[in-house]
Image: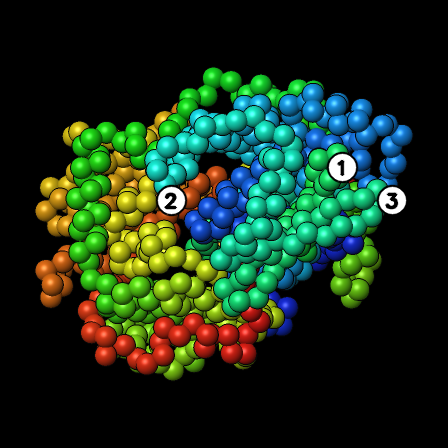
Amino acid sequence: MTSGEEIERTFRQLTAKTRAAADARVLADASAALARGSRRPKGVFARRWRRIGALAALVPAAVLLAFMSFGKSSSIALADVRAAVNAKSWVHFRGDDGSESWVSLTDGKAYHKGPSFLAGKTRMLLVDDAANRRLSYTEGDAAIYEDEPTVYEDGKVPEWKPRTPWEYFLGWHERQLAHPGKFGRTERHEETVDGRKLVRFDDYYTDALGKDILVMQIWADAAMRLPVRSRARRQPGPEEKEKREWETGVYDFPDKGPGGLYDLGVPRGLSLVKTERRYFPEDVQALLEKAKAARDRFPTSYRAVVWDNDRDSEIDIIHRNGLMFRSDRYFDLGPEAPAYHLPRPATLEGVLKWASGQRPMGITVFDGGREFHRSNPYPEDVPAERFRTTTRVLRESAEGYFRTSGSPPVDFQWPFLNMGGPAEIVLHPEEAPAGCVAVRFGGAGDSRQDFYVDPARDCICIKSVGWEKKDGTWRKNGEQWLPYLRRLPGGQWCATRRMQAQYVDPEKGLGLHANYYSIDVKTLKDDEFPAGMFDGERLLEGAGAQTY
Amino acid sequence: MNDGSLGGRPAGDWMREDRLLLRSLRRGDEEALRRIYEKYKCDLLAVALCLVGDLSTAEDCLHDAFVGFAAASAGLSLRGSLKGYLAACVANRARDHLNRNLRWGALSEFADVAAEDCDPSAGAEGREQTDRLAAALGQLPWEQREAVVLHLRGGMKFREIARQAGISTNTVQSRYRYGLEKLRDLLNSGDEK
């Protein structure tokens, strides 16, 4: 007779061991998925955009490659090759990561198809320099997105003129060679590969600590006036985990390139979503201007402390003094690690006292021109992974830094100021808190964000709701509330509590996850900031530096 | 089943370590990913084997579940245990595999694997018992099999299974009870033969 207890015992004996080959497959694929799925901050995304642009700019010069790739000798007469190349108007670049780019030298259109930041997805781009437009589509998107255009100093888009491969791909390097920039320079070298003389342009970037870093190389046949091969250093970040420091690629010169994004595999019938702010309706523009003015009135010298008063979570202590900023992030390791645990509920004084005896896990300092970010390892007596202490240093303008990064509570209070379109004021919104105006961003595709803004209180976003469309139905995926506000001594409104909720797909086994944060803001005078608090160089002590 | 210890270490240690590993994973730490895999791979493979009855398919389930977990880790926020979450992921993949008309594999390969890696003290009698249990599992309806396996082999509490499956705790308990009764009947009928 088999009892329930015997069945339970037998279940415990059902042990299995994975096979080495299966382990290797799982870990390889999961690591790649991890790298692709890692979230990137906006700044990195923007840099990646620029890099794609640069890559696209490099690509067109590769036309000649077909004739002069490494390791092959050609019996074709130089004049014949040159004539053949000059007759071509397309340049194709194939990268070693599987990406491809095409550039039309006659009309300035560049197409790119390659791995997306999203796991296992492909991204397609069209960069039209002549029209100053950029269209993008990522596999699975419900729409094609038109990105913000390049902003030129005089407000005019330069006239596009057909170029030779040399002008398009090597011209910038030659100019940089003759006139080094403030943070970059180019060297020219000659080398012989398989009996063929090539020139190589090496581009150096002077990093935030003054060190020259080789960031790009391009080889070209000066006699043929054509690019051959290029390689570009990858940005730090998730790529580090792939152990690939460089992206390389070669050029060839097809007779024809893509006729549009659809030729790259973008599905037909999708709507075009314009994210440019110039398309915002007047009422949205007016609201944004009013909110921006309120944000600009918010104090720029203060200390903010943000902590979850219900559960062990991260604790942030932020200081801003004008164009200098510092954030110290602590992790409460929970009641199982009492030495690193902050019992809840906790008062402001309790949080500050606890933090004074802890080592922050992350420290970010912006000194007005550079951002330093130091990652510290977990405490030694906590059984955790082997972490290195590193400090990443990046150069950034103050205007750009505070526009994109924000700092609590500013980023909580006016999150909609960095949003792209389309945008509209929603009339008679169902969920609006009393007195709030609803402004909606997105919605043409499969996601949208609704912000409920209180015009009477500095246009602060009292509530925001994120939506996603699945199987034709809109459903919430996240929500934020700032239920309590108070006035600072200068009269500005400031949030004192923040509720953040995340709705996760039940099919994935996750439900609502909510945090309730307390926020304390205290305005400070210059002499009230601890000495040396904004000295980023201090964060380099005992840490490995990453500067690119 | 949930005796508060795992591998000789207090459950609190393991959960604390899981929390730290998850934090690291959210930052894209590959080492944390490896640690989590090494920590739970055998348990998860056993869960998958119990659910699909075929080693290759079970390995596929484990692979797909873990790759999906890695891809979604940046935005992951857990309410229950990491092990329970991963076991539920494996169960979801197993259901997908079976829905794609992959039949129950009768656990013949499970027996081979188990024979190699079971506790040696279990002996031949123990292995015979696991073989019979494995064969009986294949005769349970999916819902009952899932409830029984996730609770007894995945170490998940009923409310955890209910939350992951989006159903009530009572429903999970019912499925578990019916499943266990049927298993007992099947095994006892084998005894009588």
Residue closest to the eye, A519 or A276: A276
- Report in which chain the residue with disc 1 lies: A
Do discs 1 and 2 share a chain? yes
Residue closest to the eye, B171 or A91: A91
Q: Residue at x 53, y 62 (%)?
A: A207
Residue closest to the eye, B92 or A9: B92
Name which residue type carries label 1: Ala
What is the x, y in percent for residue A317? 32, 69
Of pointers 1 and 2, the one earlier in the residue sequence: 1
Q: Residues within 10 Å of mark 2 (few under 14, many from 20)?
A: some
Q: Residues within 10 Å of mark 3 (few under 14, many from 20)?
A: few
Q: Residues within 10 Å of mark 1 (few under 14, many from 20)?
A: few
Q: Residue at x 77, y 31 (%)?
A: A66
Of marks 1 and 2, the one in the foreground: 1
The residue indicated by pointer 3 is A194
What is the C-alpha distance between the residues marked 1 and 2? 61 Å
Label 3 SS = loop
Do discs 3 and 2 share a chain? yes
Label 2 SS = strand
Name which residue type carries label 2: Tyr
Which picture quadrant has residue A110? top right
The residue indicated by pointer 2 is A503
Can residue A34 be seen from the camera position used here?
no
Name which residue type carries label 3: Asp
What is the C-alpha distance between the residues marked 3 and 1? 15 Å
Would you say A11 lies left or right of B171 here? Answer: right
Q: Is residue B118 above or below residue A231?
A: below
Would you say A388 lies left or right of A310 here? Answer: right
Of marks 3 and 2, the one in the foreground: 3
The residue indicated by pointer 1 is A223
Of the 4 image quadrants, the one containing the C terminus of chain A is bottom right
